[in-house]
Image (cartoon, rainbow, N blue to C red):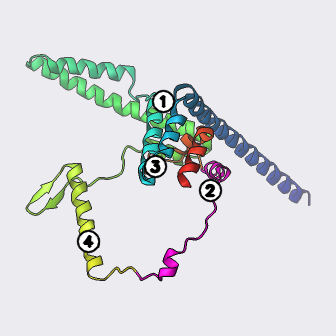
Amino acid sequence: MGHNRHQRDEKTRTRDRREERLSHVSQRKNLVNNNKLYQISEHSHSTNSGTTESLNEIITSDAETGIKYRKIQNKLKEMLASKPRSKESYLSKETLELLDERRKQISNKGDKERRQKISNLSKEIKENMWKNRKEKRNRVLEENIKRTGGTKKAMKQLSEHGKEWISKLKQRESYLTNRLSIQELATDYYRLLYSDKLDSGLATIPEVNEAKENKVDEVPEILTSEVIKAIKSQKLEKPPGPDKIPNEMFMGTLEEISPVLTKLFN
């Protein structure tokens, strides 16, 4: 019986330690998120005092809703671009000096001794870059484990491969390699594809009764409080969507952006 009591006590202590550890991780995560929101909010108030007025001008203009949305999107991107960013290179000072030295050697006139020196520098640079990359990987993993208790976000951060893009596309007897040309060709293909379906009757629009067509249901306007609630429900530290605007941006400018979005949605 004493043995069973000891096991229960041990399980209780283990559970308490786990809950305490999760609590600390959660507190650190909230602190990081709050700091991010504070920095965005402070930057918004200090350097973009005229942004709210500009957004209101867009909303009250006679432009179509789609055009208004794109203008607001561009304005928010301008705010993000104006926020100073510090991109830390994973290369050490020694590696950067070696790269600089190799550039100088390459720019000089060639001889056998210089070529050998460039070869030695390249070998040393390669070894240093491998070492620097490994150090960065360990550092990022350690920081994420301390902050979130896991490595999922660290692996995303360390991933060096972006989304794959078609490198070439065949057009008749030639190949397109320019990104814009590939995009235009793909757009024309799908436009023609769906146009053929409409003409052949595969996709038909059902007839609508004239009385129903003219009937407009009364829909209540969206409230600013609803917009604020929707923004606050979004998760932080998630990659942005196609508009490239992170959720932290909306959270940090909640006071300024919520009335503007309310006008746009209504």
User: Which numbered circle lies on residue 83?
Assistant: 1
Q: Which residue is mark 4?
A: 193
Residue at the location (20% across, 52% down)?
A: 181
| Tag 3 near tag 4, CB within 8 Å | no
Residue at the location (23% across, 62% down)?
A: 188
Residue at the location (42% across, 35% down)?
A: 134
Taking depth in this image into account, of 117 and 161 the one nearest to the observer is: 161
Q: Nearer the viewer, mark 1 or mark 2?
A: 2
Residue at the location (55% across, 31% down)?
A: 44
| Above or below 197: residue 180 | above
Q: Which residues are magenta?
A: 206-234
Q: Could you tell which of marks 2 and 4 lies nearer the N-terminus?
A: 4
Q: Could you tell which of marks 3 and 1 lies nearer the N-terminus?
A: 3
For residue 167, side relative to residue 109 (left or right): right
Q: Could you tell which of marks 3 and 4 lies nearer the N-terminus?
A: 3
**SS assignment at label 3:** helix
Q: Which residue is mark 3?
A: 69
Q: Could you tell which of marks 2 and 3 lies nearer the N-terminus?
A: 3
| Tag 1 near tag 2, CB within 8 Å | no
Q: Could you tell which of marks 1 and 4 lies nearer the N-terminus?
A: 1
Q: What's the distance in space between the residues labelled 3 and 1, CA to CA? A: 22 Å
Q: Could you tell which of marks 1 and 2 lies nearer the N-terminus?
A: 1
Label 3 Cα crowd, 10 Å radius (few <14 / some 14-19 / many 20+): some
Q: Which residue is mark 2?
A: 222
Q: What's the distance in space between the residues labelled 3 and 4, CA to CA? A: 29 Å
Q: What's the distance in space between the residues labelled 1 and 2, CA to CA? A: 31 Å
Q: What's the distance in space between the residues labelled 2 and 4, CA to CA? A: 38 Å
Q: Residue 86 placed where, x, y %? A: 46, 27
Q: Amino acid at mark 3?
A: Tyr
Quarter of the image where the N terminus is located: bottom right
| Above or below 38: residue 109 | above
